[in-house]
Every structure is written in structure tokens, then in C-alpha cells.
């Protein structure tokens, strides 16, 4: 698959099978899933992060495909805070 042949696509919105995206994030980017949340009845959002500070936000659909929603660097965990 092309996703595994070169660098991860730079453009947000790239879609492939969830397995292909997961393999690329783990093997090529060194990222691990650190968060997950329900977006709607048919999809979840997953946050993937590496120790180097890279991060990827993935939308995972019930049909087995996933899309890269956003990527970036220098993710910082803020922890819980009091409501404003």
C-alpha cells in the first residue's frame, strides 16, 4: 500500500484502512494511541503521540476505514483544569 511506502501524507484528510494507518503511525512515526473519544454513533477520534512530540488526530469509522484529521509537533499535555 502506498501509505507504507513513503512518508505519511502531509495533507489532512488522507483516508485508508484503519490497519494501514495504525501500522504507519506505529512503525514509521513511532506514535502510540494516547486518547480516544466518541464523535458520533459511527466514528471515534483517536489521538496518537510520539515521545518526540509529534501527534496525529485520526477519525476512525465503523466501516473499517480511518482518516488523518490533523498532524503536528510539540504536543503538550495540560492536564485537568478548573472550569472557566
Image (spheres, helix red, strand yellow):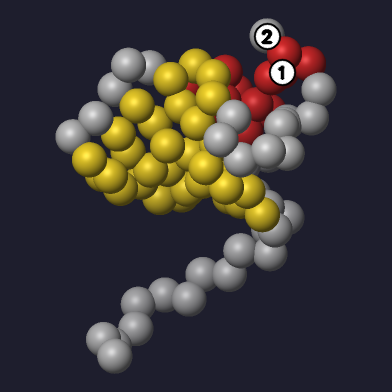
x 57%, y 47%: residue: 70
20 relative to 11, above or below: above
x 71%, y 18%: residue: 4
Q: Is residue 82 shown to the viewer in this render?
A: yes
As drawn, the label of residue 47 is none
Q: Is residue 44 left or right of residue 20?
A: left
Q: Is residue 51 left or right of residue 83?
A: right
Dot 1 lies on which element?
helix
Alpha-carbon neighbours of circle 2 within 10 Å: few (<14), some, or many (≥20)? few
- Of residue 81 and residue 67, the one placed in the foreground of this image is 67
Whether the residues at callouts 2 and 1 have beta carbons within 8 Å, the answer is yes
User: Which residue position holds label 1?
Assistant: 4
57 relative to 81, above or below: above
- Of residue 16 and residue 11, the one placed in the foreground of this image is 11
- Of residue 10 and residue 76, the one placed in the foreground of this image is 10
x 22%, y 40%: residue: 40
Residue 62 lies, in percent from the top left, at 29, 22
User: Which residue position holds label 2?
Assistant: 1
Q: Is residue 2 left or right of residue 34?
A: right
Residue 60 lies, in percent from the top left, at 39, 31
Dot 2 lies on which element?
loop
Q: Which residue is farthest left?
A: 41
Amino acid at each position: 500500500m502506498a501509505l507504507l511506502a513513503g512518508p505519511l501524507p502531509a495533507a489532512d484528510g488522507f483516508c485508508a484502512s484503519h490497519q494501514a494507518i495504525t501500522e504507519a503511525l506505529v512503525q514509521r512515526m513511532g506514535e502510540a494511541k494516547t486518547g480516544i473519544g466518541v464523535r458520533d454513533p459511527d466514528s471515534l477520534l483517536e489521538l496518537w503521540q510520539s515521545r518526540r512530540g509529534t501527534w496525529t488526530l485520526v477519525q476512525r469509522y465503523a466501516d473499517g476505514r480511518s482518516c488523518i484529521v490533523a498532524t503536528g509537533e510539540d504536543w503538550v499535555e495540560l492536564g485537568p483544569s478548573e472550569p472557566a
